Amino acid sequence: MKSVVYIVSDGVETCGGDPVKEAKDLHQSEIEAVVNIIGFDLNEAEEESLKKVAKAGGGSYKAAENQADMEDYFDSQRRLRNIIRANHYEFDHAMGMHHHEQKQRQKIMGLIHDIYNNRGILVIRYYREYDRLTHATEYLAEKEKLSSTEQEKLKEMIETRLSELKDYREEQATKLYDQLKKDMKRAYKQVKENARVD
């Protein structure tokens, strides 16, 4: 963050010596100061000289005819700084929240994703259950512990169970994403309120 120096001058001579060099040196020093000049009740030649000083200092020049002009200038600078701070605050927090939202989405996907090579934990578990129940049914039918009618009825129940688990997964995914969306909307609103400049 750069420092801002305000010089109020009623002429170039108040800066002493070589004001352009002094402003440039201050601007390029370790503190990286921006030199703004307020010219108070000056003639045209003095204004031009002070504009050069402000430019060399990386700042700007503002003419003031009276104290009210100077106060208006300082008020506008303060408002501008507050707006810049608010924008930085909002941007930084929005980026952090976006990162958080992405991490939460990844966690949800880790639970419920249903693409074969990248299945979530819930999906892996219900397919594992489905495979085991199907194999158990086939084994029992093979060992003649189930009639064909019982085997069909059991297969139908296993398919119904798988379908219900898939529906449950979809419902949970919708709930989790909706809740995340609500939470993020509320958080973004809070950041906007905190960043508001009056």
Image: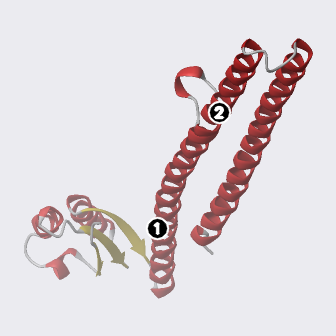
- Between 130 and 22, the one lying in front of the other is 130
Q: Residue furthest front?
A: 144
Q: Secondary structure at mark 2?
A: helix
Hey, which quadrant is residue 38 in on the image? bottom left
**Which dot marks residue 123?**
2
Residue type beneath disc 2: Val
Please rate how many residues cluster around mark 2, counting C-alpha atoms within 10 Å: few if below 14, some from 14 to 19, many from 20.
many
- Between 31 and 117, the one lying in front of the other is 117
Q: Which residue is mark 1?
A: 85
Left or right for 94, reference 10: right
Give the residue displayed 21% in from the left and 65% down from the top: 53
Count of marks, rendered view: 2
Residue 177 position, x and y percent, is: 70, 46
Residue 101 position, x and y percent, is: 57, 49
Please rate how many residues cluster around mark 1, counting C-alpha atoms within 10 Å: few if below 14, some from 14 to 19, many from 20.
some
Residue 151 position, x and y percent, is: 84, 18
Q: Is residue 42 visible?
A: no
Q: Is residue 18 visible?
A: yes
